[in-house]
């Protein structure tokens, strides 16, 4: 069966596609269609590059470019004789589903957090929700978490029988990695020219991954870090993955400077996947302050590295963090985050127990080697309907 993935493939979505393409069985063949400004690193399968097309697909709404992208996608679907189209993200969902509908091709859609959740005003939310409802067409929902599936049914209007869930899953990120404290001198030499900060030997620090954007709630993240800094001035913070589309980056920098934390809270650009995970592996905690999520791959990878997670109690985070077991799910209140994170900083026994639980939960529910067959079964079921 030939699967055609289409979407703005960046960050966690890019990881999702790379993992599934690399690990699916030989019954499947893959083609990638991404945006012109997406990750240009080749997609690999069994040591060979996967055929990839770039089309005029951009995040911002632009009717002229969007129609052009639909026509480009139609041409590729026909040329490749795709059996199933798998759409990712809001823009990829619209472009891909219209193209699949017009070519009579079966299609599944993974929102990776529905677009209307990102709307900062009620009017925008209504517009984005309407677009999601219109773009349903003949598609099946392939939610990346149980909570996203439920939202798709109750709010977007997907029929339960056409709504599937396959929890985001990743390879074992701990495999082959060494603690960053053990490789800090190598990394320091490597990063010296670009002035990227690297944790010093014995440094205690906390990590998070994500673009400074509305979804990730970056200013709240700085407020929490400042609250912790007042009690634990030695603790450093590293926000990784700052790059691509980061509309709140300057606001975040200003607040960090306002709190005189320029040498405490570091913003790192997009690094290699392995280098990013080395930072996470050496950290005390992993924390997320998002307003919403699909099912955050960065959290799952932190779990695979045995990290206790402190996260906002929102959709997506609820699907991978069990409050009091492998971390905390918290309301978006600064004092609550500061209290719970300080507790784990100061209580080694409690933190280590949560670290062990995180690793166990990852192995049972989010290890892709054990989950890829379930995704293949969904592909097959949709194709045969």
Image: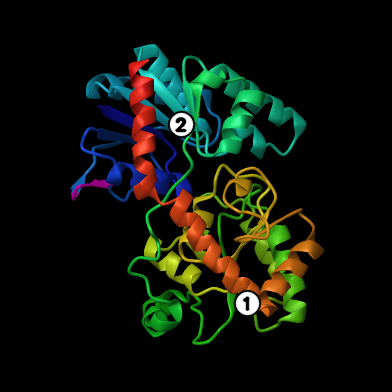
Measure the C-alpha gap from mark 1 to mark 2.
45 Å
Q: Earlier in the sequence, mark 1 or mark 2?
A: 2
Q: Where residue 21 sits in the image (x, y, percent)?
A: 30, 42
Q: Residue furthest bottom?
A: 201
Q: Residue at x 49, y 62 (%)?
A: 359
**Nearer to the camera, 79 or 155:** 155
Q: Residue at x 40, y 19 (%)?
A: 99
From the viewer's perspective, tell me whether residue 321 is left or right of residue 5.
right
From the viewer's perspective, tell me whether residue 49 is left or right of residue 274.
left
Q: Circle 2 is placed at which residue position?
A: 92
Q: Could you tell me if residue 243 is visible in this image?
A: no
Is residue 359 depicted above or below 201 in this figure?
above
**Nearer the observer, disc 1 or disc 2?**
1
**Crowd tier of the residue under label 1, counting other residues whose Cα lies within 10 Å: few below 14, some 14–19, many 20 or above:** few
Q: Where residue 303 sits in the image (x, y, percent)?
A: 51, 60
Label number found at residue 349: 1
When asked about the image quadrant of residue 79, the answer is: top left
**Nearer to the camera, 362 or 93:** 362
**Nearer to the camera, 52 or 67:** 52
Q: Quadrant of the C terminus?
A: top left
| Helix, strand or loop status at disc 2 | helix
**Would residue 129 be counted in the magenta stretch?**
no
Magenta stretch: give its range: 43-47
Q: Quadrant of the N terminus?
A: top left
Q: Residue at x 67, y 57 (%)?
A: 218
């Amino acid at each position: 069966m030939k699967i055609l993935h289409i979407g703005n493939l960046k960050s966690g979505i890019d990881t999702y596609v790379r993992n599934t393409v690399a690990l699916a069985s030989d019954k499947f063949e893959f083609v990638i269609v991404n945006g012109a400004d997406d990750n240009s690193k080749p997609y690999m399968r069994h040591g060979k590059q996967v055929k990839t097309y770039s089309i005029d697909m951009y995040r911002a709404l632009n009717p002229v470019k969007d129609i052009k992208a639909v026509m480009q996608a139609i041409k590729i679907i026909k040329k490749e004789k795709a059996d199933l189209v798998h759409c990712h993200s809001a823009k990829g969902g619209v472009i891909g589903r219209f193209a699949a509908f017009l070519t009579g091709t079966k299609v599944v859609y993974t929102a990776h957090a529905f677009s209307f959740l990102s709307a900062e005003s009620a009017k925008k939310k209504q517009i984005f929700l309407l677009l999601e409802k219109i773009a349903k067409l003949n598609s099946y929902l392939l939610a990346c978490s149980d909570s996203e599936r439920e939202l798709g049914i109750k709010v977007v209007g997907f029929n339960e029988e056409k709504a599937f869930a396959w929890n985001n899953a990743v390879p074992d990120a701990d495999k082959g990695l060494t603690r960053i404290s053990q490789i800090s001198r190598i990394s320091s030499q490597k990063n010296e020219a670009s002035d990227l900060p690297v944790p010093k030997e014995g440094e205690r620090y906390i990590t998070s991954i994500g673009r400074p954007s509305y979804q990730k709630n970056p200013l709240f993240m700085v407020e929490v870090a400042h609250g912790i800094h007042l009690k634990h001035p030695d603790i450093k913070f590293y926000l990784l993955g700052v790059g691509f589309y980061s509309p709140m980056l300057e606001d975040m920098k200003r607040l960090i400077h306002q709190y005189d934390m320029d040498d405490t809270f570091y913003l790192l650009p997009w690094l290699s996947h392995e280098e990013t995970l080395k930072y996470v592996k050496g950290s005390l905690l992993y924390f997320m302050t998002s307003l919403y999520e699909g099912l955050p791959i960065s959290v799952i990878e932190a779990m695979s590295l045995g990290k206790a997670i402190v996260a906002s109690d929102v959709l997506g985070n609820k699907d991978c963090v069990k409050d009091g077991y492998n971390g905390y799910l918290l309301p978006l209140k600064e004092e609550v985050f500061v209290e719970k994170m300080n507790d784990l900083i100061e209580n080694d026994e409690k933190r280590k127990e949560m670290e062990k639980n995180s690793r166990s939960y990852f192995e049972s529910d989010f290890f892709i080697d054990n989950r890829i067959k379930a995704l293949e079964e969904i592909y097959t079921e949709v194709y045969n309907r």
